[in-house]
Image: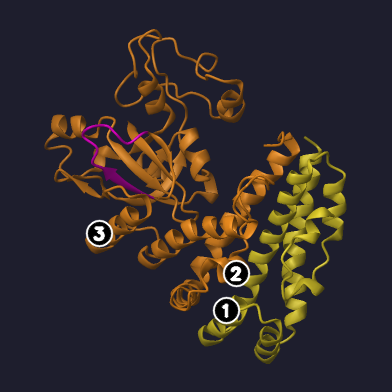
Amino acid sequence: MPSQKPHYRHLRDKWIARHRELQGTLWSKHKDSLGWLGNKSKQLAIGSSLGGLLIFGLPQIQPVSTSNSLTFNEQIAQDIDKSVFLISDLYNVLPKEVRHLTFDEEQKISDIIFRSFSIKATAVLNGKRLNRSYGLIGLEQHLARFPGDNMRSHFDTQEEAKKFWSSGMASGLGAWGYFASSKDKLSEKDKLREKYYIAVQTFLAPGFNENFAKFRDFFKYRKMLVVNPNNGKAVIAVIGDAGPAEFTGKHLGGSPEVMHYLERVDGSLKGPVIYFFIDDPSDTIPLGPIALS
Amino acid sequence: MLYLNIMEKHFYSHLIETSLLSLELGDIDLSKEERIHLGLLIDSNIHSVILDAILSELSEKDKRIFLAHLATNDHNKIWTHLRANIKNIEEKIKKAAESIKQELHRDIKEAKGK
């Protein structure tokens, strides 16, 4: 891999993000005809190698490498195949406005997720659910992981610090307190839980007030799949905090790392995500970004 | 520019002038691979905007006809269809491209300032 210069990285990240947004717009505005072509292409076996390339023109994410055994067009076609069909499938199910999903919609989305990521994710788990499973996500701050954790001790690498320092650290603790009782006891798992956490409105979950202890234990570090339906990016996160307050107009929050990966932002440009529970009692599904299968 | 040799020739390529963007990228210290990749990203950003501009002008039936021609890359059929269904299509494509090109210029300028 050639060295990557800062100017290159800056432009690459910006233009890939814009490309994904433009694709999202394209699909949201013209989903019927694009969906029609997707089906037609499959029937005619012209598929993404030709039709997809000409229509979506998505360059591969990594720079061109002469040692790559795939041809350039084949690589592009693979990238398109994987994300475009997920985006298209979700557009066909999700409502135009960001509202509560119906049971039927949730079931269809579970099916799409299983097809796309090979994991079972549902809006209801063990009879419990959140107040919603599709909502607007805002940016949260870093959480203190152990007593004395601060911005100077928070990052493992300079690169992480550079990328995520600006989000700052919340003045209070997460809903479950510290992730570890001391710096020495902070495990890799604890680090990942803080890095990939979401804040959800646990306090609005149906039945929460009547069964506080049961619901608290259920939600504590519960794994969830969070998907940006506009670009198909998804991350496995844990419930690490409760919030945001209803008056904010936001329905959940993501850690700086979650937001960065999903390419979601706060403020007037905030957008929706799907968030479903993952049933992973043996704790085998790793936290962090998840690739399409 | 290197990337121009491998970029897809689109049905609208004769209407879109990207040499200024290429020149601006040429001023930045980039490897050959990085330059190619950024060139392709420029191409794909412009492509998405133009497709949206065209599809937004067509009826559902005409969108499908256009997409079918696009999928087979038949430039003659694409142009016959577009000229029959969208008034001043060439100007509309140029205008759509111009807006995204301005954003791309701003991005390059911003990157140079970093």
Chain B colour is yellow
Along the line of sight, the residue nearer the viewer: A65 or A228: A65
A49 on left or right of A180: right
Along the line of sight, the residue nearer the viewer: A197 or A291: A291
Q: Do marks 1 and 2 both belong to one polypeptide chain?
A: no
- Chain identity of mark 3: A
- Give the class, few, some or many, for how many residues have Cα within 10 Å of label 3's Cα (few <14, many ≥20): some
Circle 2 residue: A55
Q: Contact (CB < 8 A) between labels 1 and 2?
A: yes
- Chain identity of mark 1: B
- Which amino acid type is marked by label 3? Gln
- Which mark is nearer the camera, 3 or 2? 2
- Name the residue located 36 percent from the left edge and 23 percent from the top edge: A189
Residue A19 shows in the view: yes
Q: Secondary structure at mark 1?
A: helix
Chain A colour is orange
- Chain identity of mark 2: A
Mark drawn on residue B67: 1
Give the quadrant of the C terminus of chain B: top right
- Name the residue located 51 percent from the left edge and 83 percent from the top edge: B60
Mark drawn on residue A135: none
The stretch of residues the image draws in magenta is A274-286
Q: Determine the CA span between mark 3 and mark 2.
A: 30 Å
